[in-house]
Amino acid sequence: MKLLPMNGPELFDLVAGWLAGRENHQWLDFGNGRQPVTPALLKIMAQRETHFLRVYTSDRDDLAIGILGLNSIDRTFKTATFWGISGEKSFRNRGYSTFASSKFLTLAFRDLGLNAVNTWAVEHNPSLRTIERLGFRFIGRQRQCHYIDGRPYDRLMFDLLASEHRELEHDWRHWTERSHREADCEQRQAQPG
């Protein structure tokens, strides 16, 4: 698995396509209720110091399968807001986003010098499991502030300090081996008799 910088029109188009999908953008907010993000906006975000974006790949090849980002990076207060999505749905529930997020947070704390990273998730969002596995701590609830299909939902707020972060290297090997066994089994079952 690799964490690749956002560069080139192909990646901007690919990621914008992922973010345009309702199954992804309904959980996000890029300011003023903006949900879908254009390739042009991604390019601007990739060039600003207040954002840090990486595309993560599968472990078998360099196929881009998701994106991770930090918004509102404040180098004075050493803080940022974390977000991410799985773009290629066939890689869901196999540990890729958790492992990639763990590596990404290591970069945020070690290379960017951040001390605290916060994130939020809309209640009932499946990514809450990933947030918990990464060691984020629940710090509060923003009530009825996120609308999906005209219905208000709460946002659950979390944070993680650099001193609390532990990269999930060992767990990834377990996830990867299981993921490959499952994929190989699915391929054998799909082959004609």
Image (spheres, rainbow, N blue to C red):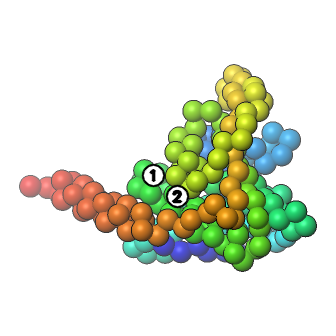
Whether pointer 2 and pointer 1 mark residues with C-beta atoms closer than 8 Å, the reply is yes
Q: In this view, does 35 lie above or below 87?
A: above
Q: Position of residue 28 (x, y in %)?
A: 70, 44
**Position of residue 187 in the picture relative to residue 106 (left or right):** left
Q: In this view, does 119 lie above or below 155?
A: below
The residue lying at 56 percent from left, 55 percent from top is 134
Q: Which amino acid does label 1 sit on?
A: Arg
* 193 or 186: nearer the viewer: 186
Can you identify the residue that label 2 sits on?
Answer: 97
* Labels 2, 1: front one: 2
Tell me if mark 1 has few (under 14), some (14-19) or many (20+) residues whose alpha carbon lies within 10 angstroms of its own.
Answer: few
**The residue positioned farthest toward the left in the image shown:** 193
Q: Where is residue 102 in the image (x, y as percent from the top left)?
A: 57, 64
For residue 32, what is the image quadrant? top right
Mark sitting on residue 92: 1
Q: What element carries label 2?
A: helix
The residue lying at 9 percent from left, 55 percent from top is 193
Q: What residue type is labelled 2?
A: Ser
